[in-house]
Image (cartoon, rainbow, N blue to C red):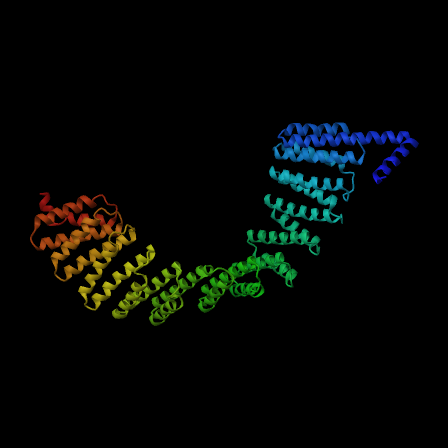
Amino acid sequence: MPIPDWKKIGDLARSLLNPKTASARADAGVDLQVAQNLFSQAVKLGQAGKIDDEISIYDDLVQRFGQSSEHGLIGVLARGLCNKEALLGSLGRFDEQLAVFEEIERRFARFPVSSPFGEIVAKNFLRKCQTLRQLGRFQQEVAVLSEFDQRYGRESFPVVRHMVAACLMDKAIALGRLSQFEDELAVYGELIERYGQDPALEMRKLLCNALNNKSLRLEALARPEAQIAHCDEIERRYRSEASALEKELLAYSLLRKAQSLQALLQMDAAIAVLGEIARRFGASEEAVLRELVAHALHQQGLLFVKAEKFDEATTASEDIARYASPQAAIGLRVKIASGLIGKGSKLAAVGQTADGLAVYDEIVRRFGDDPAPAVREKIARTLFNRGLLFSQLDRAAEAIASNDDLDRRFVDDPSPALREIVAMDLLNRTANLLKLGQAEQALSVFAEIDQRYGQDEDPKLRVHVAASVFKKGQLCGYLNRNDQAMQAYADLEQRFAHDNVEQIRNMVADSSVTRAKILAGQGLTTEVQAIYRTIIQRYAQDPAPAMRQLVAWVKAQPQTASNDN
């Protein structure tokens, strides 16, 4: 005979010997079966979308069996109440949900926390806190979390111990939402003190979060000294071999320490800490840590640039590529180039021109073949500055060689910024050609600027095109080629007369006056008067002081006065 059949016979024999007990057990068994059937029915109704009917059955379970002391029935009742609470929360009926939290507490608080019902009560506390948080009732949340800690804080049961630690974390966060920052920091400190030596993995994760949150709050409060002390504490905890999570925390902590040292203007110390990050975690294969090492090297490189330690900054830039993508160091290379350009400009400004030129040559040597667009722009700016400095030193031939180098490198680059630099450099080249008496070559460059950029709609390039046409007219006038000068000025007038860019308007106005003077020298008074009338009509309402002065000057001319008469 199978074992279950022997059990049934045994139960029957006991019921015959004690009919009263057997009857009670039979009734309890029937109640349990009814309760389980009702619970199953409720779940099916919920799955069918009949949520109110599901909740109604849970209420019926409480009404029928709420006073039962049978363990099985209590279990069904607990499951029903927990389901009801979750449903009310999902429906947004938070006041009713909060009432169910209270009922769960009242019915099951008598059970020890190590029992399933006791654990339900503990979790009920934390779910209640989640609802209060969702409702923005942070003060009430703090009160419930404090009650939880008071009730369970001394429990050694592992599950509850973790819940207490999580409760302290939530309490600190809630205090932060209430802007009670000192209390928030104190709770983080309490959590760290109470659970800082707990070896359980989940507790170590919570500890890392608490240490990190405290660091973030100190950073937000701009307390660099306290931040440094906290980072030192993290370092003492994890200076030896630690888990990946703890290594990540330590790396972030060292980054924040470096930032705090910068805030205190302790730049050398900050550079050393950033270097320590690379030393400690440079061999790691973990993506997060490699990214943090690259970030630390980038920050270190920026500090080197500020200190004008460009060799060290370049080394940091080269190291970044080992820990991140090749593109990761572009920003630092741009900063290094910018820093060197600034250094060269400063040297030139104080008369140390040879040193300034040497710096420009160094930039080209370091970054001349760099393909990154942002770095190429810096190279173009360097060559432009170098050519300008040669020109200021009246070393026109060397200036032209620098102009040629810039044009060779960037003539076909479509970048708007580089096109503008090339256009400006071509204009500078004309000035250098004129210093060497090469007027025809200068006229050719003016024509080349117009040919390259004459149809470009970029306002900055339009200024340079207009300047090339205007300067062409000036040069032709200087060479006594008045017909060519008049043609250039007429071209400028036709193309740019209605341009709203102030620089272009000024050039058009100046060219009109120059045309009038040339015509006046030829005795063509009628044509001069026509130009002056156009100037008055065009610029009489112009708000620019220079234009108002020009109009006043034109009105004072004899040709204008005779015309008015």
Q: Residue at coordinates 28% horizontally, 50% vertically from top-left? A: 457
Query: Which quadrant would the N terminus be assigned to in this image?
Result: top right
Give x and y (percent) for residue 498.
22, 46
432 w.r.t. 129: above or below: below
In the depicted view, which residue is nearer to us: 279 or 304? 279
Residue 47, can we see it? yes
Q: Specify whether 362 is left or right of 213.
A: left
Q: Quadrant of residue 148?
A: top right
In the depicted view, which residue is nearer to us: 267 or 499? 499
Furthest residue toward bottom: 354
Residue 106, can we see it? no
534 w.r.t. 79: above or below: below
Q: Specify whether 119 is left or right of 177.
A: right
Furthest residue toward front: 1
Furthest residue toward left: 523
Give x and y (percent) for residue 422.
29, 60
Q: Residue at coordinates 9% horizontally, 55% vertically from top-left? A: 521
Give x and y (percent) for residue 529.
11, 47
Query: Which quadrant would the C terminus be assigned to in this image?
Result: top left
